[in-house]
Image (cartoon, helix red, strand yellow):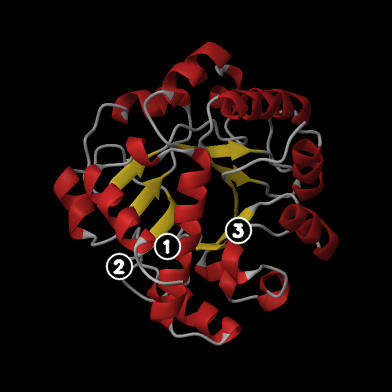
Amino acid sequence: MPPLDTHAHVDLAVSTRDLENLGAVIFIATRSIEEFGVVQDREDLVSVWGVGCHPSLVRAQRSFRDEDFRAALEKTPYVAEVGLDGSSRVPLTTQSAVLDSVLAATRQLPRIVSLHSYRATAELVQALKNESMRRSGIILHWWLGTELETEEMVELGCYFSVNYSMAKSYGTLKQIPLNRLLIETDHPSGDRFSSRPRQPGSVSDVEALLGNHYGLTGHEVRLQCWRNFVHIVDATNTAHLMPKPVQRMLSAVRSQPS
């Protein structure tokens, strides 16, 4: 299986060929509904563009419209980057209102949702605990919560996408079950200290670090992350929205023995 990167940022003008040449399946986070509008009709073979509303961007938050977001959901299986940010100039009340709209929309139309929580982990825990039902498809991107918060997120059924910067600190990793593990680069932020090439989909350093932590080879870590991702895709019923080659990869993982 190729590398799987569940959260990266990529220039909107990147060519399909350049993405394919990375040799990885990449889930690309946009920062606003407006940005997603630029890429929503692309037909990349191994990359998936998400619709986002970054909590630290004033313009994206102020221009968020529930009806626009719901229309965008019809075009993608992936939502990112959304969430809460305690360092943002956007009031937390505004961020929370946007996140509530995102969670409500993805309750009705399930999607894979990658959540940002910088300096707002407690608030994100509460937002998810306020949900009226156990959610499928929630991925905590670059999670830095306390032990208690992490335990609560595990109980809520969340997955955790780990980048190089996060993998270098084993504090949080010790609480993440292997069957909830995913890998991201969060390019160009989360991989800025990893070895070259620092690019979306370059996750071998993270796989090696996680292998050391879980007592596995890098190959075994990659396969486990694919298995975990298949569970998310199946739980959200989003396989049909993936590019055809990615659909075939998902089927190949399903056919392998556990």
Q: Which residue is mark 1?
A: 226
Task: Kindly report the distance in space between the C-alpha atoms of the residues bearing marks 2 and 1.
Answer: 8 Å
Kindly identify the amino acid type of the residue bearing the numbered disc 1.
Trp
Image quarter of residue 165: bottom right
Task: Kindly report the distance in space between the C-alpha atoms of the residues bearing marks 3 and 2.
Answer: 20 Å
Kindly identify the amino acid type of the residue bearing the numbered disc 2.
Met
Bin the neighbour count of mark 3 within 10 Å (Cα to Cα): few under 14, some 14-19, many 20 and up. many
Q: Nearer the viewer, residue 233 or 147?
A: 233
User: Which residue is painted at 47% across and 56% down in the image?
Assistant: 229
In the rendered image, which quarter contains the N terminus?
bottom left
Mark nearest the camera among 3 and 1 is 1
Bin the neighbour count of mark 2 within 10 Å (Cα to Cα): few under 14, some 14-19, many 20 and up. few
Using the rendered image of the protein, determine whether residue 191 is visible from the camera's viewpoint. Answer: no
Helix, strand or loop under label 3 = strand
Image quarter of residue 120: top right
Q: Are marks 2 and 1 in contact (CB under 8 Å)?
A: yes
Asked if residue 65 is positioned above or below residue 202 in the image, the reply reads above
* Dot label at residue 160: 3
User: Which residue is painted at 24% across and 60% down in the image?
Assistant: 22
Asked if residue 242 is positioned above or below residue 199 in the image, the reply reads above
Q: Which residue is mark 2?
A: 1
Q: Nearer the viewer, residue 205 or 139?
A: 139
Q: Which mark is first along the chain, 1 or 2?
A: 2
Kindly identify the amino acid type of the residue bearing the numbered disc 3.
Phe
Helix, strand or loop under label 1 = helix
